[in-house]
Amino acid sequence: MHKRSYYIINAITFYRLLAAPILIFMIFNGNFNLFKWMLAVSFFTDLIDGFLARKFGTESVFGARLDSLGDDLTVIAAIIGIFVFKMQFVKDNLVIASIVFGLLIIQNIFALVRYHKISSFHTYSAKAAAILQGAFLILIFFLPHPNYFLFYAASVVTALDLAEEIILVLILPKWEANVKGIYWVLKRKSKNEEPTKGRDYQFQ
């Protein structure tokens, strides 16, 4: 694994951590145009850092945790933006949003109780949900009207992903990063295989 690639890719991920509080500041400052463009950049970095990590073989436990935290903070900033700039949309879709948010809370509570930290599974369903979420959360600020097809698709896939992750927390006794999904975990267990442990690379 290349030392330079490792640092560059983690720096791209770290950008999202730095951008999140700036995005929130822009929201409450009423700087809508700059907010929506910076939010789009943050979601774009989420697409490229994972791809680059796999391509250059720099996947690590530290990178997975950093990526999950950056993703969560970016989504939180986007949701705050929706509450401030698109309040009517929130009122019209409060039931769906509450169901998804409830599943998220349950999943995080389960993970904190079992692992004493949030999960970082990065399942295939989570990746699909992230793409749909990112597309919807960007376009809602760029289009004159919300794209309801993307909203419903993102909501359904996100709910399924969170349900899967709740089950994964229940069947995996130890914290693992980059778990493909329930099927692969059960397949591994049926063969009595050990999980592939992510490496937390550190360079001197």
Image: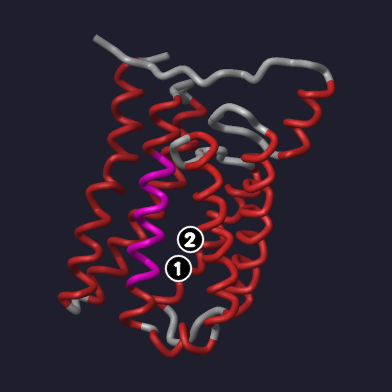
Q: Which mark is residue 137?
A: 1
Q: Is residue 168 above or below residue 18?
A: above
Instruction: Tell me the quarter of the image containing the N terminus.
Output: top left
Reading the image, the residue beneath label 2 is 134
- State yes or no: residue 70 in magenta: yes
Q: Residue furthest top?
A: 204
Residue 154: quadrant of the picture = bottom right
Secondary element under disc 1, as helix, strand or loop, is helix
- State yes or no: residue 30 in magenta: no
Query: Main structural element of the magenta stretch: helix, strand or loop?
Result: helix
Q: Is residue 183 left or right of residue 41?
A: right
Task: Please state which amino acid type lies under the numbered disc 1.
Answer: Leu
Secondary element under disc 2, as helix, strand or loop, is helix
Q: Is residue 117 left or right of residue 19?
A: right
Number of other residues with Cα within 10 Å of mark 2, as a class: few under 14, some 14 to 19, many 20 or more: many
Q: Position of residue 112 (x, y in %)?
A: 48, 42
Q: Is residue 9 above or below residue 193?
A: below
Name the image colouring: secondary structure
Q: Is residue 160 above or below residue 167?
A: below
Q: Is residue 30 left or right of residue 133?
A: left
Camera-side residue: 70 or 110? Answer: 110
Q: Are marks 1 and 2 in contact (CB under 8 Å)?
A: yes
* Chain part drawn in magenta: 67-80
Q: Residue at x 68, y 57 (%)?
A: 160
Q: Residue furthest left?
A: 29
Camera-side residue: 84 or 6? Answer: 84
Q: CA distance from mark 1 to mark 2?
A: 5 Å
Q: Residue at x 41, y 19 (%)?
A: 200
Q: Position of residue 156 (x, y in %)?
A: 67, 66
